Amino acid sequence: FDLFFIVLDECNEEMDLNIAKHIVSVHRNQICESTTPTFTKQQLQRYIRYARGIDPIITSEGKKTMVQCYRSLRQNDNIGRHKSAYRITVRQLESLIRLSEALARLHLDDVVQPKYIREAYRLLRISIIRVSSEDIVLEDTEYVPKRHKRKETLVSDLSSGDERAKKSRRVE
């Protein structure tokens, strides 16, 4: 996925009641008076079919805007103590391209305008999950269940000639 958003469902008794009534009425195929569609199903299908056929081009101005937006994402995303690790990679640049092209199609435009690129950048930027914890340091030793010796001890026993360890060939 190119965008990732966390949706919080906050409890509101009145809102929950209205939503529940609406879903139950829609589920029972009852027409809801409060929603009158602007477009028919056929009109939407025709629009989507036409939009999918558009293959928008990215102009040199668009490419410059895209590079600026990608660099901005990278520069604002350095993490870690040494500020040399990044979560923004070329995958996000590819996402920026796909989203910009999708916005052009949405507007039935043959050209990826800089405004579409800036909107794609905005969407990407707000969808990036920020982690505010320090770097995690992992120990060098492997986890070995309690009934087993640590791997280092077993190797030491085998190499030092511990006959019991050699005979059993299993970790105690």
Image (cartoon, rainbow, N blue to C red):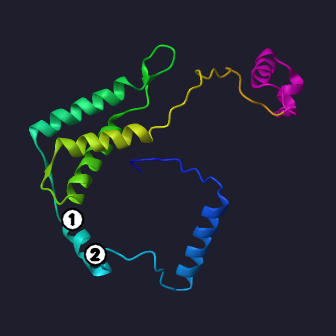
Residue 71 belongs to magenta span: no
Q: Provide the residue span drawn in magenta.
A: 146-172
Label 2 sits on a secondary structure element that is: helix
> The residue under label 1 is which amino acid type?
Ala
Kind of residue indicated by mark 2: Gln
Q: Can you say whether 94 is above or below 161 in the image?
A: below
Q: Position of residue 144 (x, y in %)?
A: 78, 31
Q: Which mark is residue 126?
A: none
Residue at x 30% of width, y 44% of height: 120
In the rendered view of the protein, which quadrant contains the C terminus? top right
Q: Is residue 82 left or right of residue 144?
A: left
Mark 1 lies on residue: 51
- Residue at 36 percent across and 33 percent down: it is 89
Residue 148 at x, y = what percent? 84, 31
Which residue is at a point 51% across and 86% down the rendered structure image?
29
Left/right of residue 64 with respect to residue 76 in the rendered view: left
